[in-house]
Structure formats: structure tokens, C-alpha cells
Amino acid sequence: MTEDSKDNKTWKEEIEISSDALIGKIKDLAAEAQVRRVRIIEPDGDVAVDIPLSVGAIAGGVVVLAAPVLAIIGAIAAFATKVKIEIVREEESKGEDDTD
């Protein structure tokens, strides 16, 4: 962890999505540089999957998700009609007070 990363602000948002669009949405979110974590929440409120993401997960704009994670997401999509996705985003500080 670098010193700059300590100043970053994070925030959460929740969206409800149909199971048909779940895998595509997860891939889109993983491609966004600001997204740090994605949680899939079942209709009963339990967290089904917690996926930590980092800039290192993105290689040349192509999202690399492990096959087991995609299999779990696919299984969730098969059993639930709608799920909630909790997205944790990080805003990088601008460093306006740096005098280097």
C-alpha cells in the first residue's frame, strides 16, 4: 500500500439486477479502474460472493476473472431471479497540496 492510497475516498452503491445480466455486469464492473470490491447479495440478504478487485486484475483492458468465480456467479444466476450488487468504488485523491 502506498502512502497516496491512504488518502483515497471510498463509497458504496447498490443496484438490483436480473440474473440474466449478472455475469455481464460483473465483468463490466471489474473493468472499471475505480471499482475495488463487488459483493453479490442474495434476495434473503446473505452475501453470496465477495469479489475483491484491483488494478492488477485488469491486463490491457481485458478483465481476468478466475473460472471458479464465474462458475459461482453462474450458479447464483441460475437460482435467483434478481440479486443485488454492492459496489465499492475508490476515488483517487488529486494531490493538490503536493509541493514536489
Image: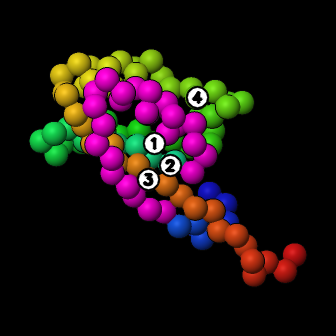
* Circles 1 and 2 in contact, beta carbons < 8 Å: yes
Structural distance between the alpha carbons of marks 3 and 2: 6 Å
| Label located before the other in sequence (2 or 4) | 2
Residue range (magenta)? 10-34
Structural distance between the alpha carbons of marks 2 and 4: 13 Å
SS at badge 2: strand
Foreground residue among 1 and 79: 79
Residue identifier under label 3? 88
Foreground residue among 20 and 75: 20
- Amino acid tagged 2: Arg
Foreground residue among 68 and 77: 77
* Circles 3 and 2 in contact, beta carbons < 8 Å: yes
For this view, does 60 lie left or right of residue 52? Answer: right
Task: Write the residue at 16% across / 39% down.
Answer: 43
Residue 20 % position (x, y): 31, 23
Residue identifier under label 4? 63
Task: Write the residue at 40% across / 26% down.
Answer: 23
Q: Residues within 10 Å of mark 2 (few under 14, many from 20)?
A: some
Q: Does residue 34 appear in this view?
A: yes
Structural distance between the alpha carbons of marks 1 and 4: 13 Å
The structure's colour scheme is: rainbow
- Residue 52 circle label: 1
- Amino acid tagged 3: Val
